Structures are given as C-alpha cells and as structure tokens.
Image (cartoon, rainbow, N blue to C red):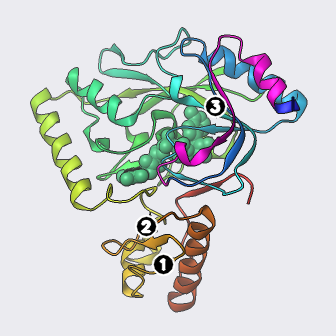
Amino acid sequence: MSRVAKLAEKINQEGGDLRFDEIMAAHTTFKVGGPADCWLRPASGSFAACAARLFTEAARERIPVFVLGGGANVVVSDRGIRGIVLDTGSCRGESTPPQAGGACGETLSFGAGTAVDEAVEAAAAKGLDFSFFAGMPGTIGGGIWMNARAYDHSFSDFLSTVTLLSRNGEFRTYRRTDDFGYKRSPFQSTDDLILGGTFALPRRATEDIRLQMARFRADREAKGQYRFPSAGSAFKNNRAFGKPAGKIIDELGLRGFRIGGAEIAPWHGNIIINRENARAEDIKTLCDEVRGRVKRETGFTLECEILFAGEW
Ligand SMILES: Cc1cc2nc3c(=O)[nH]c(=O)nc-3n(C[C@H](O)[C@H](O)[C@H](O)COP(=O)(O)OP(=O)(O)OC[C@H]3O[C@@H](n4cnc5c(N)ncnc54)[C@H](O)[C@@H]3O)c2cc1C
C-alpha cells in the first residue's frame, strides 16, 4: 500500500467515502480531470475532526492535500492530482459551528459543503434574501474562497464570519474586514480550509425572494450557462479594459474557436465549453491561445478566472 493510501486509511476513522485513483472528471462541472491518488469525503458529522487529523498528519508526512468544493471553477489536469483530495461535500451540519442552515436573527450559517443553491433555498424559506446566487453551481466554501459574484453582488457583501481550519490543525473564526475585492478573498493567499460561513442577509417577503430567484435562474438558462459542461466565466473582468472580457473576445471573432474538444461558446465570448470529450489540456491551450491573441491585438492581459489544479 502506498504512503498516501496508508495515511488516508489511518485518518478515515469514522468510515467516510475513501477512493483511490478516483477520476476527477466525475467531480468537476467541466467534466475533465484524471485520477486523484486518493479522494476522501469524510463521514458527515465528523468532517472537521477528520480534516484536522488529515492536515496535521499530511503536513508531517509532506503529502499534499487539495481542497475541493463543488468543482465548479476548476480544471483538473488530465494527469490528475497527486496526494489527497479532501472533498467538502459532507461538511454540513456539524458540532463545530456553524451549523448548516441554523438561523439566528437576520444571520444564517452554512457548512462549507452546502450547495450554493441549497443555501439560497434555505434562506428564502426563512424570508432572508440570498437570491443573487440562485442557480450558481458550487458550494458555500468555494463561493467564499472565490468571493463569487453574480448580479452585482459578491459573497463578501453578506459575509460576517468564517470558520477556518489551518494546516497545523488549529480552528479559528475570521471576522470580515475590507480585505475582499472583485473575485478576491483573503483566503486565496492562505491554505486554510473554510469550514463554514455566517451571512447577514436582508429580510424580505418570501414570495418576492422566490420571484427574484426564478428570474435569475431563467436568466442563466437563457444565457446558455447549462448547455454544455463549463466552469462559468473563463476570464475575469477588469475595469481598466473598459468593456467586459467576453466583449473583447467577441470583437476578435473568437466565438466558436475550438481546440480539441474545448470551444469558446458560440453564444458567449467568456464561456469556454467542453463541446466534445475535451481534455483538460485542450481547455488550458485554448485559454493560453485566447490570452495570447487578446494581448497581441489589444495590449490587455486577461486573467483566468478558472483555476488549473493538479499535475500539469
Ligand atoms: C454554469 C456555471 C455558472 C457559474 N456562474 C458563476 C457566477 O455567476 N459567478 C461566479 O463568481 N462564479 C460562477 N461560476 C463559477 C463557480 O460556480 C464559482 O466559482 C463557485 O464559487 C465555485 O465553488 P466550488 O465549491 O465549486 O469551488 P471549487 O471549484 O471546488 O474550488 C474553487 C477553489 O476554491 C477552493 N475551495 C473550495 N472550497 C474550499 C473550502 N471549503 N476551503 C478552502 N478552499 C476551498 C478550491 O481549493 C479551489 O482553489 C459558475 C460556474 C458554472 C459551471
């Protein structure tokens, strides 16, 4: 048995879902990605304890641990991921605060692995408005890490506290300050695990919230976001460009431009789709090609919003 497998077996005391050579395409919305040496979704109810053991033991043995939420913003390489993938899907209601869906006045707390759409629904049921993120794939933890943004609202607009676990196994509570920006969170410069977040949400009539949720979902549908596997916007917008990244790409006539199975969506310049059995390498090459052309033609440097994970 490999060192990685031995460690994973040892820390998985509560019988979580542990798999070896797990194909990551099954865990990403782009539907690409080769095998992870080991993929672990700890048993629900003991996620935090298991993650703490994993972090301390893996650090001691110098085994890398990659944290995966809903896989809605990552391109995992065709070679896969070395070490252990910690999947947060079971980080929901916990003895470690916050409790998924626990209400306290106008605030709501969700475990990191809660699907964003599920959180939006839970908030609406309590008359709290988190509707801007209706229909957005991914988890609460991933949304906090990315500082996800939709319909002019960022996660950080509502966030009050975040429960964190450091790589040396220490828990702490982060209180929001101003260190968030456009699709930028302070967690991007640490390797802390987000265990959950508490959001202060405006109170509104549930039927108004539900109407708005339906409008946002329909708008995403109309924009073709779910037509093919993707990770949403491929490139970040930048005020300095004077126009959205997608418009710049459109103006260069790159809609429908294809490398292997990866394609710039024919209906939107800033969405890369897995048109037909794309490899992760196709997506990466396409991103590099688009960035190169935009730089040459306009002088602008596009920044990828999608993240490249694993062994490239
Ligand atoms: C159809 C579609 C539409 C989309 N629309 C939008 C949109 O409107 N706005 C927008 O901002 N994004 C959008 N996205 C992108 C994606 O939904 C968001 O970036 C989302 O926040 C990613 O969450 P995730 O849980 O899937 O994170 P993942 O993709 O799993 O991970 C992203 C990063 O976060 C880290 N991470 C994840 N969870 C944790 C955790 N608990 N602790 C520490 N680090 C963590 C990972 O290590 C990785 O670096 C869209 C994607 C798709 C497929």
298 or 291, which is in the foreground?
291
The answer to whether the residues at label 2 and label 1 have Cβ atoms under 8 Å apart is: yes
Of callouts 3 and 2, the N-terminal one? 3
Q: Residue furthest top?
A: 95
Q: Residues within 10 Å of mark 1 (few under 14, many from 20)?
A: some
Residue 258: mark: 1
Q: Is residue 305 left or right of residue 214?
A: right
Q: Earlier in the sequence, mark 1 or mark 3?
A: 3
Q: Image height check: is 294 above or below 113?
A: below
Q: Residues within 10 Å of mark 2 (few under 14, many from 20)?
A: some
Residue position marked by numbered label 2 in the rendering: 275
Q: Position of residue 304 (x, y in %)?
A: 55, 65
Q: Image point 50% across, 70% down: which residue?
A: 261
Residue, disc 3: 193
Q: Give the residue type at disc 2.
A: Arg
Q: Is residue 16 magenta?
A: yes
Magenta highlight range: 5-30
Vertical side of 114 occupied by 152: above or below: below
For label 1, the SS is strand
Classify the position of the C terminus by image quarter: bottom right
Q: In the shown orientation, is residue 81 left or right of residue 298?
A: right
Q: Nearer the viewer, mark 3 or mark 2?
A: 2
At horizontal 45% and vertical 29% (from top left) the residue drawn is 160
Front residue of 105/32: it is 32
Find out if the beta carbon at label 3 lies less than 8 Å from the nearest ligand 1 atom. Answer: yes
Q: Kindly check if marks 1 and 3 are in contact, taking CB atoms under 8 A apart as contact.
A: no
